[in-house]
Amino acid sequence: MAESPEEVAVLVQRVVKDIRNAFQRNPHMKELILSGTLNPLKDLHLGKLALTKFPKSPETWIHRRWVLQQLIQENSLPSLVNKGNLGAAPVERIHRLVQEEMNVCSEAAGRYPSNYNAWSHRIWVLQHLEKLTVKVLLDELSSTKYWVSMHVSDHSGFHYRQFLLKSLIGRTVTDNNVLVQNQMVNEQNPSLQKEEESAGAEAACAEEQSVDLPRRLEEELELCTELIDTYPGHETLWCHRRCVFYLQHHLSNKLPLLSAVVSSVDSSDETLNNSHHSPATSHMAQAMDVDGLNESSSKQGYTQETKRLKRAPMPDSLGPEMEYQFIDKVLSTCRDADQARFATAYRKWLVTFLGQ
């Protein structure tokens, strides 16, 4: 006799629960993979199935990262090719793994609100399977824009975008530093110039010049404005606006400050839950995260190098003036009590922050 849909659903839940329990006892799963009994790709598929029912399961995400590490080891990929599991070139295989992980993270984030485990895993994938190039970061900003627009109360998604923006600033500064250092070496020791170094510097310069960082941050503020107007009364949007304005302010006025961002985004251990707050920014730590941005370093004088690095500075008063105008508009037109409260709190934060 055929089983009813209810009985099938219960059976599926039991199977998925058993799979998750297996990941909780992951040493046994690891032994199966290391011995060659269990295909790592099959294991990832099982993990994906478990995440459909338990999207926040820390054990599943931790085990998944371990499996991915096995896949990207030099002695793992050739053996997989021999077994016919991955027939494409190494770069294409890694790209497929990245795309699959991005999809798994998106699905899990949609099933559980504020799923920091999923977004932290997404950061880990970018740091270990992909290179944090400008193109990758811009693609991620573009691909997650719709998701955060549909989840305006989910801080974890906006926190991920903050990571991308900080990484984009850090990546650009890193590329600039490489270019300037190579130029200084070549000026002092022309005989040491090599073709490969010159090509790398030119590539870094071309990539950096293609990114208008002030414009990117301005677009993020425009996104905040649109979402705040469309969905009033969501504190997450105002917190994200604080972070974007903070980055915008220091990009336009305190470029040496960005050296702290580079060390932060290049760290392989950074996740959404691993943030570092400097004493000077402790007054806003509860409202936003500023991973590694050290206010004290902003007091350093400009060197010849930082003058050469600076690109398209924005007027000092333009950003704050526009923010105050936006707050006035919100307070004069909104009928939502929470919206008015958040706008007032944002004004107080601006006064405190700009009055430092």
Image (cartoon, rainbow, N blue to C red):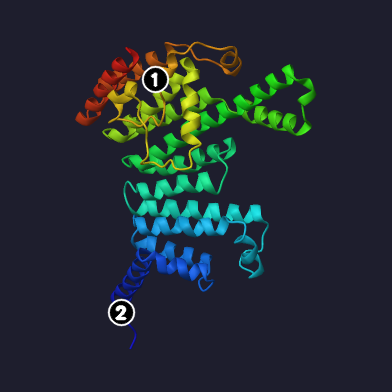
Q: Residue at x 33, y 31 (%)?
A: 288
Q: Residue 310 appears in which quarter of the rendering?
A: top right
Tell me if I can see residue 72 in this picture. yes
Give the camera-side residue of 246 and 38: 38
Q: Residue at x 68, y 57 (%)?
A: 89
Question: What's the mark number on residue 214?
Answer: none
Q: Is the residue marked by circle 2 packed among few (<14), some (14-19), or many (20+) residues within 10 Å? A: few
| Secondary-structure class at tag 2 | loop
Which amino acid is tagged 2? Ser
Total labels drawn = 2
Question: What's the mark number on residue 295?
Answer: 1
Q: CA distance from mark 1 to mark 2?
A: 63 Å
In this rendering, would 252 be left or right of 81? left
Q: Earlier in the sequence, mark 1 or mark 2?
A: 2
Q: Residue at x 51, y 74 (%)?
A: 37
Q: Residue 160 appears in which quarter of the rendering?
A: top left
Q: Position of residue 233 (x, y in %)?
A: 26, 33
Quadrant assignment for the N terminus: bottom left
Which amino acid is tagged 1? Glu
